[in-house]
Amino acid sequence: MTERGSVATAAPEAPTDRRRWIGLGFLAAGLSMIVLDGTIVGVALPAIITDLGLDLTDAQWVNAIYAVVFAALLLSFGRLGDRRGRRTVFIGGVVIFVLASVTAATAHSAGALIASRALQGIGGAMVLPASLSTVNATFRGRDRAAAFGVWGVVMAGMAAIGPLLGGWLTTSFDWRWIFLVDVPIGLVVGLGALRYVDDTSSDEPAGPGVDVDGLLTSALGFGLLVFGLIEGSSIGWGRPIAALEIGPWTWSAQAPVSAAPVAIALGVVFLALFVLGERRRGNTGRSAIFDLKLFAIPTFSWGNLTAMTVAVGEFALLFVLPLYLVNVLGLSILGAGVVLAVMAAGAFFSGAMARHLAVRLRPQGVVVLGLSLEFAGVAALALVIGPATSPVLIAACLGVYGLGLGLASAQLTSLVLADVPTRRSGTGSATQSTVRQVGSALGSAIGGSVLAVRLGTDLVARLDEVGLPAQLAHQLVRATADSAGGALSGLREQGVHGPLGALTPQVVDALAAGFADAAGGAVAAAGAFLLLGLVGALQVSRTLRHHPRHEAPRPA
């Protein structure tokens, strides 16, 4: 099975030449750039919130908009790369990503930063499916197993190392450097891809027409769903608690229902229309960005469910933990990055040995083991989180989680795509990447929403123990929630000389305890999604056991 425009015309077991391995290095570097930007922002959020005056909703959007746009466009760009050349789309994405990084680094308002993050999402949506499908089309046999091993390590490692790099850049320089660091990387990747990466494309006949309907319904569905989840904490989940203003348009606070549940319901409707529309286009032979027939492959369907739920848990953690470490435990941003970087150490260590372990356990066994460790680490973390928990204990739990992350990520991608025909690799890889990005967007939204809801109850309960007047307690709760915990740092610095006088230490302790309770609830929610991912991985293993014709080969 060969591909038009691809140099991958040798026999399946033929060795891959040195040039392609160098090309893999540049593809992996491009992947590392966009994966890094999905996680590097989280640890810098406390500094960004203070500098730009963001509230919790703004902070969620800074984190989530990247993944929302990423998810909405991945399928379209995956299909475009298959038809027009994957290297062309890859390099175009790198250029857009670098330009967006420059505008993010120079942003001076929440709106400008959020818009730049959205533009980064467009670039990332071009880079990821084009690069992954190029690897799938170029490498064969033993080389493919090794290439996907490199891919998994980069995915897991760069996602985990982002917080450490973000903490170091923010502390040593400024938060804007978390974006400027993309510029030299992008230039090297773009030039290297031109020289060492072949421009592959698919020989699968494309149906007539352009799937504009699919693009619009998927983008509206994903966007409205995440919009509702993020905005619900500030405008209300049932009846409105505040007006929603978008440009000249206003959803009144006197409306019978908040805009948040309406947006979520509309998002579900648009996603249903998207699925129905793609099914109809596929049945009539027209061009479609979403190939529903791929979900007839058991490993693909169950593996994608696993990938999405794991991403929800992972990004919920990466949103909540930096806020907890900096605002409750009082760590510096660099200190928080060091604690979170223990994930990177675990992921790099286990990712490197995952392929060898798969020889004994098979890839699906490694994924199950990895997810079991991820769940165990997060469950322990939810139990130990408190206002005075040792950072060493937090790091130990994250180390267990990181070990599982490396094992699961290193094998999950190849397992999901193992039975996907090469000619459909662009669509398959884009679909798998889409569900991961949907998961990461939902993770930031769900993690932030659970945190906001719990803050509204846990902070009130803790302040009641101090005996503050109701109006003052309400103001403190609102200030802490709106600043995503940043108000705690200001109260600590004021000490007894602030407006609360001698009550300040008691109030700080109460707010810290309430924020820790809320963070623990958000971490528990992340653990629930990881458990669901583990159930999906077990189903993949069961499917392979009962249908050996679908089973992925043992790693060579």
Image (cartoon, grey):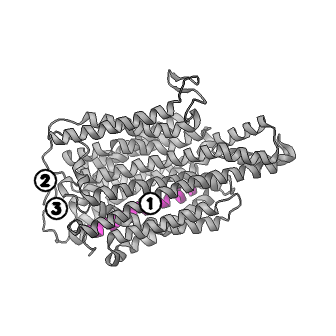
Tag 3 residue? 8
* Distance Cα–Cα, label 2 vs label 3: 9 Å
Q: Which mark is residue 158?
A: 1
Residue lying farthest to the bottom in this orientation: 360
Where does the magenta region start and end? 144-168
Q: Position of residue 275 (x, y in %)?
A: 29, 41
Residue lying farthest to the right in this orientation: 502
Q: How many residues crowd around disc 3 within 10 Å: few (fewer than 14), some, or many (20 or more)?
A: many
- Which quarter of the image is occupied by the N terminus? bottom left
* Distance Cα–Cα, label 3 vs label 1: 28 Å
Residue lying farthest to the top in this orientation: 248
Element carrying mark 2:
loop
Q: Is residue 509 left or right of residue 435?
A: right
Nearest the viewer among 462 and 6 is: 462
Element carrying mark 3:
loop
Disc 2 + disc 3, Cβ < 8 Å = no
Q: Is residue 498 left or right of residue 287?
A: right
Q: Position of residue 155 (x, y in %)?
A: 40, 60
At label 2, which amino acid type do we have?
Arg
At label 1, which amino acid type do we have?
Met
Q: Which mark is residue 232?
A: none
Upstream in sequence: badge 3 or badge 1: 3
Upstream in sequence: badge 2 or badge 1: 2
Q: Residue at x 27, y 67 (%)?
A: 544
The quarter of the picture where residue 154 lies is bottom left
The quarter of the picture where residue 480 lies is top right
Dominant secondary structure (helix, strand or loop) of the stretch shown in magenta: helix
Q: Is residue 139 left or right of residue 118?
A: left
Tag 2 residue? 4
At label 3, which amino acid type do we have?
Ala
